[in-house]
Image (cartoon, rainbow, N blue to C red):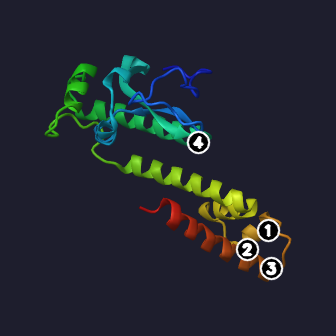
Amino acid sequence: MAKNEFYRNFSNRKSFNNKSLEADEELVPVVLTKEMKVTLKPMGLDYKNVETWKFPNGKRVPVAFIPNKIGLIDVYMKFFNEEVERFLKHKEEELSDDLSLDKFLEDIDDEDGNGFDPTGTTENEDNALLMMIFELLIEELEKQDSSMAKIIRLLSEGFQKKEILEKIDLGKGKTQGYVFIEKTQKTALKIYNEKFRN
């Protein structure tokens, strides 16, 4: 699928299970891998809503659409593009014959799990989930104090506390600044444990 003005707006598509979106949700594309099928099938995956997107050299990728909180499209599209690359790369390396979409969808319905697995790992899904949780955590911190959100983002990027105090004007002395950073870390951990930890 060519990147155009519609590449970030999928409102003209149907959700994988035909359910209506909440007011704070939008649809995002996902590569319909075996792991994704295992996740979506119990929630009512409707194969009529699966599309085939063409990529360079005429290669095809099965795509479904899932609800997502509005405002995280960049995170999802980055993950989606990585999944497409991984799917196409795996297809080239592992298959001597091209896998047709029909065969792929047949294999997806294979209840005993003997169908083609284009991924073999959930590492990318796990990483994407962590990225999404992190962004939701940042949003929660932003509601309490924008400085807290900035501090956690900078810590995640590897900045030391001293460097953070140089980058963010907290309106506090050095010692109070360190105390505030520690308070921010404790607050972030509390939010994570209460809202995002399974």
Circle 3 Cα neighbour tier, 10 Å, few/some/many (<14 / 14–19 / ≥20): few
Q: Nearer the viewer, mark 4 or mark 2?
A: 4
Mark 4, residue position? 72
Q: Residue at x 63, y 65 (%)?
A: 155
**Residue type (three-letter) at the residue carrying disc 1:** Glu
**Residue type (three-letter) at the residue carrying disc 3:** Lys
Query: Tags 2 and 1 in contact by the CB under 8 Å rule?
Result: yes
Determine whether, in the image, residue 101 is placed left or right of residue 153.
left
Determine whether, in the image, residue 159 is placed left or right of residue 118.
right
Determine whether, in the image, residue 7 is placed left or right of residue 119.
right
Circle 4 Cα neighbour tier, 10 Å, few/some/many (<14 / 14–19 / ≥20): some
Q: Residue furthest top?
A: 58
Please state the horizontal and vertical placement of residue 25, each as a whole percent of the image.
56, 37
Q: Is any part of residue 187 visible from this angle?
A: yes
| Mark 3 vs 2, N-terminal side | 2
Circle 2 Cα neighbour tier, 10 Å, few/some/many (<14 / 14–19 / ≥20): few
**Residue type (three-letter) at the residue carrying disc 4:** Leu
Mark 2, residue position? 162
Determine whether, in the image, residue 40 is placed left or right of residue 104.
right
Distance Cα–Cα, label 3 vs label 1: 10 Å
Mark 1, residue position? 166
Q: SS of the residue at dot 4?
A: loop
| Mark 3 vs 1, N-terminal side | 1
Mark 3, residue position? 174
The answer to which image quadrant residue 163 occupies is bottom right
Q: SS of the residue at dot 2?
A: helix
